[in-house]
């Protein structure tokens, strides 16, 4: 981490998805990029994360989740053509006295056209609360919705217009620290990248 922290573990993979046929093809070895505007701490450079494990790339359940999420967010008259699908496995760790920050930090909008976020695991932590600030030109002063995901596959779906943030996590009452794992899947239509 650019702040010297060591509280975040992640893997990243990119797929090409045919909106017409639902065919998924993994594209190996692609770095991940976020602008400085979106991610002031770690943005502005191509970051090479560990790739998805081979079992994950081939995992039929992951493929079904990608196709399910795609179907929830993209209207049928917008679906045709090739899409790029980013899959992020993110673990934030908190140890006693050392909180873990979410990614990216602070209130922001995502670069990608559409994104789904699924909670995988939440163990022995406090915090990690989602805040949503509308989709106007600026975020609302106070959050319009506050939500703590607690259960496996508690999920939310949004597009590039939504202002949002996640609070840092802190270690819970049990010994040994804790973590929050999320699966983030984003969808970009390359011709519409702005
Ligand atoms: Fe985000």
Image (cartoon, rainbow, N blue to C red):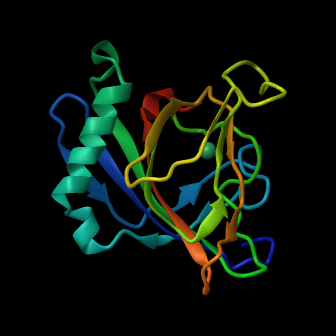
The C terminus, quarter of image? top right
Q: Name the one closer to the observer, 55 or 37.
A: 55
The residue that appears at 72% across and 61% down in the rendered structure is: 42
| Left-right relation of 127 to 49 | right
Asked which quadrant contains residue 187, the reply is top left
Q: Position of residue 86 (x, y in %)?
A: 42, 50
Q: Position of residue 189 (x, y in %)?
A: 42, 32
Q: Is residue 186 visible?
A: no
Above or below, 170 against 116 in this view is below
Total numbered circles: 0
Q: Position of residue 96 (x, y in %)?
A: 72, 82
Asked which quadrant contains residue 177, the reply is bottom right
Above or below, 99 against 37 in this view is below
| Left-right relation of 50 to 173 | left
The residue that appears at 27% across and 46% down in the rendered structure is: 65
Q: Is residue 41 visible?
A: yes
The N terminus, quarter of image? bottom right
| Left-right relation of 88 to 102 | left
Above or below, 24 against 41 in this view is above
| Left-right relation of 190 to 142 | left
The residue that appears at 68% across and 32% down in the rendered structure is: 163
Q: Name the one closer to the observer, 21 or 151.
A: 151
Q: Position of residue 43 (x, y in %)?
A: 71, 56
Furthest residue in direction front, as rendered: 173
Figure quarter occupied by ligand 1 = top right
Q: Name the one closer to the observer, 136 or 96.
A: 96
Above or below, 55 against 144 in this view is below
Furthest residue in direction top, as rendered: 77
Furthest residue in direction bottom, as rendered: 176
């Amino acid at each position: 981490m650019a702040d010297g922290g060591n509280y975040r573990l992640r893997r990243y993979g990119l797929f090409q998805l045919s909106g017409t046929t639902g065919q998924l093809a993994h594209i190996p070895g692609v770095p991940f990029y976020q602008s400085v505007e979106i991610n002031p701490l770690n943005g502005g450079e191509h970051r090479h994360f560990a790739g998805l494990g081979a079992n994950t790339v081939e995992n039929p359940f992951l493929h079904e989740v990608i196709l399910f999420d795609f179907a929830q967010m993209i209207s049928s008259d917008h679906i045709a053509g090739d899409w790029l699908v980013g899959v992020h496995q993110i673990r934030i760790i908190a140890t006693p006295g050392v909180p873990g920050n979410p990614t990216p930090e602070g209130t922001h909008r995502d670069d990608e056209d559409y994104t789904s976020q699924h909670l995988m695991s939440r163990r022995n932590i406090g915090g990690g609360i989602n805040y949503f600030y509308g989709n106007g030109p600026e975020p609302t002063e106070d959050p319009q919705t506050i939500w703590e995901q607690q259960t496996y596959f508690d999920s939310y779906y949004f597009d590039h217009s939504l202002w949002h943030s996640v609070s840092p996590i802190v270690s819970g009452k049990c010994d040994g620290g804790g973590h929050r794992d999320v699966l983030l899947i984003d969808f970009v239509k390359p011709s519409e990248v702005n």
